[in-house]
């Protein structure tokens, strides 16, 4: 009897070695969609092997960077079901068996949506956001939820539930934000790609600070329904990935939702942007003859250890573009001043109304506040000193404030100014560093120096690409990543991805963080382990529940 049990226990692993001939565990370091699919189709790995490999990396390296809020307890069961599909020759979908992390402000019925806020731990959606449903329909496996700056309100990526996420390239720095958990996690290969949201900078700052690629899509391209909102005017959602090809595939799936009656900005999608395959044109053509505008106002020319590396990387970038046959035109117009443009930010007028509408959705179950005011009377949140004013204003404001309509007109003016810059200089795209300085240190009052406001207000699309690294230091063995925004006219995502792919082929900037660059042993799991965020890493400068 005992012998039989022993034999049974051994038989399973032996059978697996038979089925998957190499015997080498799937290596998830820098794994891409193609890499996963090749491993599956050649029989080198099962879907369970792929998912287990990412979970093992999370178990090994997440204690250092604290990027994960929760893992999906269903992930291995789904992987097993996918292995059955492979066995029956029925494996389909552009994201088949691709592990994906959701920023924890996206609704999925599989996990709570917390936005990193202790007052939202009980917020359990009964439905997937349409964009999450689209990812799953294409075969993606929702591996878990990533940390974010609490409620996505700043760029430091610290939250009362998730704690402080650490930059994988320099453990003394933040990972950018607010989608900083996704950025740190994808840079460390915790999943193939992840999702973020962007109200001012939040898909671009984490891409920049983690040597990754992201798309902030044209306002209206992707339905935001089922994603915790901040601003009807400024919110967008999109993917963050390790290369342009994966980014294009992820965008294709996320944008496949198309018109959604629950987000009326999707009614603006022109017919030429319906059901686009963003992979189709990614590698076509070259940079030769393309014209780029470089915004001088989006630099800080005061030399310092924090600014000079950004300026040097951008100088090299301009040289690279010119060598490839492109023209770079400097734009000196003083209107391009990120601080001045920020006076048109409408978040505080829209936040309360939009958040109340989200909290009252019938698709949510569980215990949660029913209004923003109730949330901010709970004491179960963390407030960065610089955010007090913002939240207090939002609690008192609405779109009926007398300042709202004129500010919206100011945004229309800015949009015309930007279109004029494109037309008068015959530009294909506008380029500038995402951040004028390196991503800030942990404990800083704000993520200062970012340039995201221009796209946030005008709704123009941006693809962010790795542009370089600062010099190596004791804290940053391979340097701190520096990213560039490539901003285009509305609905030109294909063109921007094409520019990004040529640029990245010329430069090959992206590198994995050295602290996590070794291959690891892959555990054989009977169940998905539970991950507990480490809140002891919250800097003491950020009090909990004081407003
Ligand atoms: C393949 O999957 C589809 C969709 O789930 C299903 O309708 C079909 O019956 C399956 N075919 C086989 C051969 O299992
Ligand atoms: C679009 O939807 C928002 C709420 O999501 C609503 O406030 C607004 O009135 C709608 N706009 C139009 C023109 O219907
Ligand atoms: C520019 O950079 C310097 C040096 O880091 C810094 O002291 C200064 O505050 C920055 N200026 C602005 C406008 O951000
Ligand atoms: C940018 O705008 C801010 C706020 O209006 C102003 O203080 C600053 O001087 C401007 N910077 C430049 C370079 O003009
Ligand atoms: C809106 O009006 C309220 C009440 O007058 C005021 O306290 C608040 O600051 C205003 N908000 C904005 C964004 O102007
Ligand atoms: C918009 O631009 C026009 C023309 O330049 C100007 O007269 C008007 O004051 C601007 N409106 C706002 C709200 O900025
Ligand atoms: C990992 O990082 C170390 C330190 O930077 C470096 O020496 C090594 O070559 C890296 N290994 C790989 C596989 O990239
Ligand atoms: C949490 O983080 C602190 C500070 O980095 C560290 O000392 C502690 O060991 C961590 N706890 C766990 C359980 O990983």
Image (tube, grey):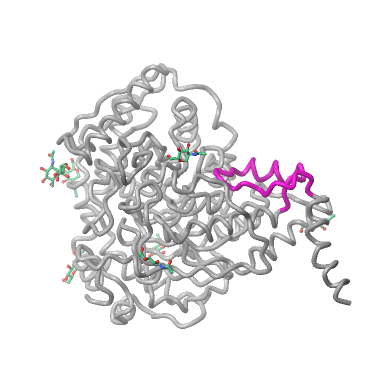
Where residue 402 appears, as percent x and y from the top left, is 19, 64
Residue 469 placement, left or right of 220 = left
Q: Nearer the viewer, residue 490 or 405?
A: 490
Q: Quadrant of ligand 5?
A: bottom left
Position of 514 relative to 303 (above/below): below
Residue at (69, 49) in percent of width and height: 93
Position of 336 relative to 409 (above/below): above
Q: Quadrant of the N terminus?
A: bottom right
Is 97 part of what is drawn in magenta? no
| The quarter of the displayed image where residue 467 is located | top left
Q: Nearer the viewer, residue 232 or 462?
A: 462
| The quarter of the displayed image where residue 42 is located | top right
- Residue 531 visible in the displayed image: yes
Residue at (52, 61) in percent of width and height: 261
- Residue 230 visible in the displayed image: no
Where residue 58 appears, as percent x and y from the top left, is 53, 58
Taken as a whole, is the magenta stretch helix, strand or loop? loop
Q: Which residues are magenta?
A: 20-46
Is 26 part of what is drawn in magenta? yes
Q: Nearer the viewer, residue 184 or 320?
A: 184
């Amino acid at each position: 009897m005992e012998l039989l049990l022993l034999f049974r226990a051994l038989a399973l692993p032996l059978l697996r070695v038979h089925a998957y001939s190499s015997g080498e565990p799937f290596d998830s370091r820098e794994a891409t969609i193609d890499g996963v699919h090749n491993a599956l189709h050649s029989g080198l790995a099962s879907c369970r092997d792929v998912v287990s490999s990412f979970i093992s990396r999370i178990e090994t390296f997440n204690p250092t960077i604290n990027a994960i809020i929760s893992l999906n307890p269903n992930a291995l069961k789904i992987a097993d079901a996918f292995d059955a599909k492979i066995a029956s020759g029925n494996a389909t979908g552009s994201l088949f068996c691709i592990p994906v992390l959701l920023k924890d402000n996206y609704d999925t019925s599989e996990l709570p949506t917390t936005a990193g806020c202790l007052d939202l731990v009980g917020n359990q959606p009964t439905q997937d956001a349409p964009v999450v449903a689209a990812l799953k329909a294409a075969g993606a496996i929702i591996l878990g939820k990533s940390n974010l700056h609490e409620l996505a309100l700043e760029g430091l990526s610290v939250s009362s539930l998730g704690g402080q996420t650490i930059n994988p390239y320099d453990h003394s720095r933040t990972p950018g934000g607010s989608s900083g958990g996704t950025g740190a996690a994808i840079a460390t290969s915790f999943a193939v790609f992840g999702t973020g949201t962007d109200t001012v900078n939040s898909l671009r700052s984490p891409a920049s600070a983690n040597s990754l690629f992201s798309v902030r899509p044209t306002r209206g391209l992707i339905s935001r329904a089922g994603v915790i909102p901040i601003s009807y005017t400024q919110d967008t959602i999109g993917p963050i990935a390790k290369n342009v090809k994966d980014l294009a595939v992820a965008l294709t799936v996320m944008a496949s939702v198309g018109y959604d009656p629950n987000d009326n900005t999707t009614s603006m999608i022109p017919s030429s942007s319906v059901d686009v395959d963003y992979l189709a044109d990614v590698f076509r053509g070259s940079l030769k003859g393309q014209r780029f505008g470089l915004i001088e106002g989006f630099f800080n020319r005061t030399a310092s250890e924090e600014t000079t590396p950004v300026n040097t990387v951008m100088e090299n970038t301009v040289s690279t573009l010119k060598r490839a046959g492109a023209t770079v035109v400097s734009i000196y117009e003083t209107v391009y001043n990120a601080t001045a443009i920020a006076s048109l930010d409408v978040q505080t007028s829209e936040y309360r109304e939009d958040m109340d509408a989200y909290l009252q959705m019938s698709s949510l179950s569980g215990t949660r506040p029913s209004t923003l005011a109730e949330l901010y009377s709970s004491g179960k949140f963390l407030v960065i000193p610089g955010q007090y004013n913002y939240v207090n204003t939002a609690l008192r404001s609405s779109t009926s404030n007398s300042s709202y309509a004129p500010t919206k007109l100011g945004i229309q003016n800015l949009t015309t100014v930007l279109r004029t810059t494109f037309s008068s200089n015959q530009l294909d795209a506008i380029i500038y560093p995402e951040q004028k300085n390196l991503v800030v240190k942990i404990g800083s009052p704000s993520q200062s120096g970012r340039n995201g406001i221009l796209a946030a207000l005008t709704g123009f699309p941006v693809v962010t690409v790795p542009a370089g690294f600062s010099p190596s230091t004791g804290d940053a063995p391979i340097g701190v990543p520096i990213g560039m925004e490539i901003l285009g006219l509305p609905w030109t995502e294909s063109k921007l991805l094409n520019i990004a792919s040529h640029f990245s082929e010329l430069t090959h900037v992206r590198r994995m963080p050295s602290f996590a660059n070794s291959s690891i042993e892959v555990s054989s799991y009977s169940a998905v382990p539970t991950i507990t965020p480490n809140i002891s890493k919250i800097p003491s400068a950020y009090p909990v529940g004081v407003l």
